[in-house]
Amino acid sequence: MKKQKIIAIYGKGGIGKSSTASNMAAACAEIGYKVMIIGCDPKSDSSITLLGGRRIPTILDLLREGLDVREEDVVFEGYAGVKCVEAGGPEPGIGCAGRGIIVAVQKLKSISSDLLKEQDLIIYDVPGDIVCGGFVAPIRKGFVNEAYVLTSGEYMPMYAANNICKGFSKIGMPLSGVICNSRNASREEELVSKFAEEIGSKLMAFIPKSQTVQDCERDGFSVMEKAPDSDIAEVYRKLGKAIMENEERVLPKPLDDERLRELTR
Amino acid sequence: MAEKEISIIHPRPSSIVAALYTLRDLDVDVAILHGPPGCSFKHARLLEEDGIHVVTTGLDENGFVFGGHDKLVALINKSIELFNPRLIGVVGTCASMIIGEEMHEAVLEANPDIPVIEVEVHAGYHNNTKGVLFALESALDAGIIDRKEFERQEHLLKKATEVEKRAGAASKEYLAPSRGDVKYTVAKRIFELLQEGKRGLVIMNAKKETGYMFADITLAVNEAAKALGKEANIVNMANVDDSLGLPRVRQHAENIMKGFKEHGVEIREIIGGMDEYPIAGELVSELIKEKYPDYDFAVITGVPHALPMECLRGMELISVTNGPRQVLPLKEMGHEHVVVEIDLHPKTLGVSKIVNSELGDTLREIIKENL
């Protein structure tokens, strides 16, 4: 039986999880892996750049309409054959998005179990901070076997990353690595690398801030599709490869507030 | 001083249900539960027997995720169309409150031309009286009750919570339910005491509609005394003041008093209104101290644990409750005999006359056997 990677990328809201996830998905698919991306954000925008800017119907949209949800209604093939799924969710300020993730993920598992099993890499793109139980459901329910934390070298994103590690250590979820998505903060790579080391993990990749990513997203594409020869595309390829080969899993030891402040000073 | 809440592990009355019963006492025609279809089912069903309509928005998984605003608006409108109510209540549940539903917005959107009592409640409160309080606060806001009645009720609720913590179902971390003593044995003991010429107090301290059945025990003890020619040896007390409480509660007092009169039973001491069971103990204590200090036994029904033991010392105590978890605390307080009328509540909803109790009927059989 082949070893399947089911990963989730956590990090502060707006730090670039979806961009990283979709570019990495595309990079892995390009070299022949079977890849699926499952967007768990109620905004349903995780896979949009793999689909040429097109929005797809979400699992919860269909469930809400009382329809019998089938695989072909919610799984769409995007760039390089990446399978794209969006959980969907309520409008901001209404209902319960956390419960939505639980329901959608369970539904997907019940209608697409074969397809899920076929994948080499499944990426759960989970929204920002873990505000309630639903947001860790992919982990808690045992769907995810590798968790990554994405952060920049700025204080608040690192604070959030550290907090997420607290959550992981509480629920006994090992961490497989830290990814730095640069926002041009000073000594960024060094800081995040040190942070990763101190919590017992390692830095998987340093993604420099790049206008190319923005430009491609604006057009509704991933870097891999729109700017395959760019430097940044190469960074995502390396990251994809590193993740596919990564076997490290450690229970993170979150830093206390004081140490975190000291580190980022 | 804030006292530490003990962690109670037996299931206890729910604040949502308490809010529903309060809406019933406030004479709403329809109570709308905003939550999952099965929430509070058993009591919702019982309340229908008591003449109010209970309906639910029946929130499902979709409702949890996307909210149930539209369903609530539609159900308010549907309820008005179906039942033509004069007053309705909307009650929250755990699910709708956790996802932050704004029931008031739904009421505004439905815009009915009758008053609506909105109760934002879930079942996660240590004391279920919270549900009553929230319902009364909303009733006050909606102009259904006045400030004076609200404050009176608030005081009674505080006292009721104290009683439950001191000697009721909230007094211990775990209380096993019990069916209490065998009714035949206890009925026989009452008969013996009367036969021996002992002097006894028959005290009904009942909570609202439960009095319809507890009153039957007063009737049966009086029948036994009469049959034995010992009527002069017993004194009846009951909390049937019909000038106190919400209209429905006053009506219960009036109905029960009428029942006593029809059976020729004299209530010597009226010890409060039918919602005053948590505070009636004070008056009972004074009365016993002044007038009946040397009585031999007491039959206490309803909420016997609300009566302080100091005034009952020296008496043989027979208490009747409808709470299976009340048996152990009563025994520990020193009540020799504790009887549970297990089906009392369902049988006292939707009635306006005294209904037979098992202990009363058992005692009546013993009268027949012996005379």
Image: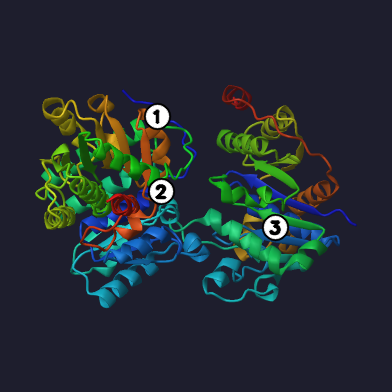
Judged by depth in the image, the label closer to the viewer, 3 or 1, is 1
Label 1 residue SS: helix
Horizontal side of residue A105 vs B222, given as left or right: right
Judged by depth in the image, the label closer to the viewer, 2 or 1, is 1
Q: Position of residue B166 (x, y in %)?
A: 34, 30
- Which one is in front, B269 or B154? B269
**How many C-alpha atoms fall within 10 Å of the one at disc 2: few (<14), some, or many (≥20)?**
many
Q: Which residue position holds label 2?
A: B123
Label located before the other in sequence (2 or 1): 2
Q: Residue at x 59, y 68 (%)?
A: A58
Q: Quadrant of the N terminus of chain A?
A: bottom right
Label 2 residue SS: loop
- Which one is in front, B25 or A185? B25
Q: Residue at x 45, y 64 (%)?
A: B37
Q: Chain of mark 3?
A: A
Asked whether residue A47 appears in the rendered view, the answer is no
- Which one is in front, B344 or B94? B344
User: Is B261 rendered above or below residue A151?
Assistant: below
Q: Which residue position holds label 3?
A: A22
Q: Quadrant of residue B103?
A: bottom left
Q: Amino acid at mark 3?
A: Ser
Q: Which residue position holds label 1?
A: B332
Label 3 residue SS: helix
Q: Chain of mark 1?
A: B
- Callout 3 and callout 2 share a chain: no
